[in-house]
Amino acid sequence: MTSMSAENGTALELVGRAALDGDADRERLFFALWPARQTAMALHALACRQAVGAGGRVTRMDSIHLTVAFLGDVPVGRIEALRSPPADLDAPAFTMALDQVGHWVRNGIVWAGPSKVPEALAALHTRLSDWVQSQGIALDTRPFRPHVTLLRKAARGELAEFRAPIEWQVTEYVLVRSGRRADGSRYETIARFPLRSLNPAGADPS
Ligand code: 2AM
C-alpha cells in the first residue's frame, strides 16, 4: 500500500500531477522514410493535383514521409536507446515505385503508395518492429500498409491517375518526433540511419 504525507500532496493532486507528468515525459515517435527534395517535390505536386478532385488539406512538402513503424507516445527515458538500432538490422537500400493512389473514407486520407511493396521495405518494417518490441515498446498490430499521406480531411474520392510512377531511391530511414500544432503535426528528425549500400565504394560490380 502506498502511504502519502501532506507534503507529497493529496491522492487527487498526485493523480493529476502524474497525468501531467505522463504527458510531459512522453514523446510521439515513429520510424520513417523521408524523401529527398526532388521526390518530395514530385509527391507534393501529386498531392496538389489530387486536392482538385478530392478536396482536403495538402501535406506540407517538408512533412511528406512514409511511416515504417509507429511507436506512439514513448517515455523520454527510453528514447536514447531508440537512437541506435542494432547494426545487424542489416537492411539494404532499395528503390520503390509509387504508382498507386487511394482514398480511405474512414479517416479522410488520400495517399500514394507502391502497388508492389518492395521486399526490402517489408523486411525493414519487420526487423525494425521486432527490435522495437524487444525494447519493451508495443506497436500497432494492424497490417503494414505503406503509404504517403497526401491529403487529410478529403471528403471526396475523385482521384487523378498517376501520370508516371514516382521512383523513390531509399538510402536511409529516420527516427522522427511528432509535435501537435493547431495547423497540424510538425515533425523533427532526431536520428538518421543509413541503409546498406547496394554498390559499396570499391566493390567490383562484375
Ligand atoms: P497517417 O499519415 O496515415 O496518419 C505520424 O503521425 C505518422 O505516423 C503518420 O505517417 C501516420 O500515418 C502514422 N501513424 C499515426 N498513427 C499510426 C498508427 N496507429 N499506426 C501506424 N501508423 C500511424
Image (cartoon, rainbow, N blue to C red):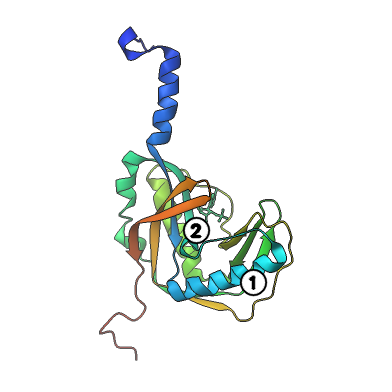
Residue situated furthest bottom in the rendering: 206
Q: Is the residue 50 above or below the residue 19 in the image?
A: below
Residue situated furthest front in the rendering: 183
The foreground one among 28 and 63 is: 63
- How much space separates mark 2 and mark 1, taking CA atoms? 22 Å
The foreground one among 154 and 173 is: 154
Badge nearest the viewer, 2 or 1: 1
Residue 152 sits in quarter:
bottom right
Residue situated furthest top in the rendering: 6
Location of residue 175 in the rendering, given as x and y in whole percent from the top left corner: 39, 56
Q: Name the residue under label 2.
A: 67
Three-letter code, disc 1: Arg
User: Circle 1: is it few (<14), some (14-19), or many (20+) Cα within 10 Å?
Assistant: some
Callout 2–callout 1 Cβ contact below 8 Å:
no
Location of residue 95 in the rendering, given as x and y in whole percent from the top left corner: 47, 76
Q: Ligand 1 within 8 A of label 2's CB?
A: yes
Please report whichever mark, 2 or 1, sits nearer to the chain's N-terminal start.
1
User: Circle 2: is it few (<14), some (14-19), or many (20+) Cα within 10 Å?
Assistant: many
- As drawn, the label of residue 49 is 1
Location of residue 151 in the rendering, given as x and y in whole percent from the top left corner: 61, 60
* Residue visible at 50% across and 63% down in the picture: 64
Q: Is residue 169 visible?
A: no
Q: Is the residue 123 above or below the residue 184 in the image?
A: below
Residue 112 sits in quarter:
bottom right
Q: Can residue 198 be seen in this view?
A: yes
- Would residue 41 be found to the left or right of residue 89 on screen? right
Dot 2: what SS?
strand
* Residue visible at 39% across and 52% down in the picture: 131
Three-letter code, disc 2: Thr
Which quadrant, please, contains the C terminus? bottom left
